[in-house]
Image (tube, rainbow, N blue to C red):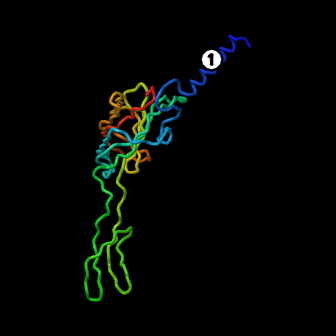
Amino acid sequence: MTSHTKTLTALALVSVLLTACGGGGGGGGSGSFSSTSSSEVALAADPDPSTEPGVLTVTDATIPSLNGVYGSGQLTLTEVYYQQAMGVKPAVCAYQFKGADKVDATATAATGTTGTATVGTTTSTPVSIVAASTTQAAVVGSITAPVSLTDAGPAVPTAFGKITYRPSATGLYFAFLTFNGKEYASGDSVDTLVDRSGNLVRFTSKTMTATDGSTDTLKLTAIIPLHATRNANC
């Protein structure tokens, strides 16, 4: 093999390696995917605390309990991950966030109705016990105290999600956001903005539809931070 032939072969190998690694873009990661559902959005790492707060406001939800403000502190974010085109799927930038707890929700136990502890004909102070079942009688020896057992209540509703946008776009590509366990999707860029210089994405009264096959919808107005560490393509 001539020296010229060896050189061409080496250059071809370098070209193949660069293509497989997503080119020379810096920051973030790279890979390939198909992004028509949230489970197909591959992400590089678990979220880390961000330095910027995010606020999400849900209105006009067909499930009224989802309405409200989510996010009272710093969110957690992954770095923005560059995902190469695959087949008809375009290349996109993707990341996820979590930790947007509902502001007006509490995780404290409900106060239930107290019962009356009775010993013979003597009535004592009302008794209340926090537990996970309905009203029962607490029995100690021959002493019976009818009481109300109140549930500790559900965890605070929270929001988290996966967000994608195309490298050259000013709006989002796909977004999958979950509110209190129910996932909603946005499949177009209408009413969304990718603000790279401000390191954030914005939703403005964006209508989102549930992904569980129901007809449930909601409107989202939000500012969600965008990790400053991201692939050069993003």
Measured as percent of width and height from the top left, residue 111 is found at: 28, 66
- Residue positioned 32% across, 80% down in the render: 145
Q: Residue furthest bottom?
A: 120
Nearer to the camera, 33 or 19: 19
- On the image, the x and y values in percent for residue 229 come to 42, 32
Kindly identify the amino acid type of the residue bearing the numbered disc 1. Leu
Residue 120 drawn above or below residue 12: below
25 in relation to 227, above or below: above
Q: Residue at x 54, y 30 (%)?
A: 86
To which residue does mark 1 refer?
11
x and y, in percent, of residue 107 in the image: 33, 58
Which residue is nearer to you in this view: 126 or 177? 126
In the image, what residue occupies the spot 35% across and 36% down? 225
Closer to us: 99 or 26: 26
User: Can you name the residue that lies furthest to the right here?
Assistant: 1
Q: Quadrant of the C terminus?
A: top left
Residue at the image point whose x is 30% and y is 56% from the top: 106
Residue 120's place in the image compared with 81, above or below, is below
Q: Is residue 176 visible?
A: no
**Where's residue 57, x and y in %?**
29, 43
Q: Is residue 191 visible?
A: yes
**What kind of element bears circle 1?**
helix
Q: Residues within 10 Å of mark 1 (few under 14, many from 20)?
A: few
Quadrant location of the N terminus in the rendered image: top right
Quick check: 20 left or right of 176? right
Q: How many marks?
A: 1
Residue 4: name its quadrant: top right
